[in-house]
Image (spheres, rainbow, N blue to C red):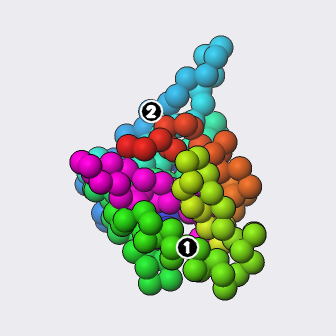
């Protein structure tokens, strides 16, 4: 996604966003039992991007806020802040030109995902409306995306 690559460390992500981000990335850790830490979550204030890092502090997921995040375009189609049904129809149509059973998948409460794009189209509340909030993942997460990131990445915001 832009200058970001999965596997980057938090400092590398901050540096890659240096021309965009005004403040350094703020990271928090989710504690596990016995004092170990789980996923590290990072955010550059005001950018509308949430970064998820694994135990080894390598980038493993990026969520884009539907209201504050940058627009992300795939194959000429905007993915952020859209009506979910319109974007789902686009993903379904796109999958028809590929192997539909290996391209298109659904998670949680019917949120569509595209293996070739490495994205799950989650939703976010905007008052009484829902808008698309894409979550990007590396290829090795596509078989079990929900277990790849913490539960908060998949909840409706």
Q: Mark yes or no: residue 15 visible.
A: no
Task: Tell me which numbered mark, 1 or 2, is placed earlier along the sequence.
Answer: 2
Q: Report helix, strand or loop for mark 1.
A: helix
State left or right for residue 100 relative to residue 135.
right
Q: Could you tell me which residue is drawn at 35 percent across and 54 percent down?
A: 130
| Residue bounds of the magenta highlight | 117-137
Q: Mark yes or no: residue 129 visible.
A: yes
* Image coordinates for residue 62, horizontal then vertical, percent: 49, 54
* Image coordinates for residue 84, horizontal then vertical, percent: 42, 63
| Numbered badge on residue 157 | none
Q: Using the image as rendered, state which of residue 151 and residue 139 is in the foreground.
A: 151
* Quadrant in which the C terminus appears: top left
Query: Dots 1 and 2: beta carbons under 8 Å?
Result: no
Specify whether residue 28 is painted magenta. Answer: no
Q: Report helix, strand or loop for mark 2.
A: strand
What residue did someone put label 2 on? 28
| Numbered badge on residue 91 | 1
Q: Could you tell me which residue is drawn at 69 percent across and 71 percent down?
A: 103
Helix, strand or loop for the magenta stretch, by majority:
strand
């Amino acid at each position: 996604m832009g200058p970001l690559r999965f596997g980057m460390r938090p400092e590398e992500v901050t540096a890659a966003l240096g021309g965009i981000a005004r403040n350094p990335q703020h990271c928090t850790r989710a504690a596990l039992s016995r004092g170990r830490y789980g996923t590290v979550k990072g955010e550059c204030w005001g950018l509308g991007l949430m970064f998820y890092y694994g135990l080894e502090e390598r980038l493993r997921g990026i969520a884009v806020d539907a209201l504050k995040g940058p627009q992300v375009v795939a194959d000429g189609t905007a993915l952020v802040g859209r009506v979910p049904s319109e974007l789902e129809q686009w993903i379904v149509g796109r999958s028809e030109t590929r192997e539909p059973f290996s391209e298109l998948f659904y998670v949680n409460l019917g949120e569509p995902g595209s293996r070739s794009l490495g994205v799950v189209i989650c939703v976010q509340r905007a008052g009484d409306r829902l808008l698309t909030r894409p979550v990007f993942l590396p290829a090795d997460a596509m078989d079990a995306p929900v277990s790849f990131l913490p539960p908060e990445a998949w909840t409706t915001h």
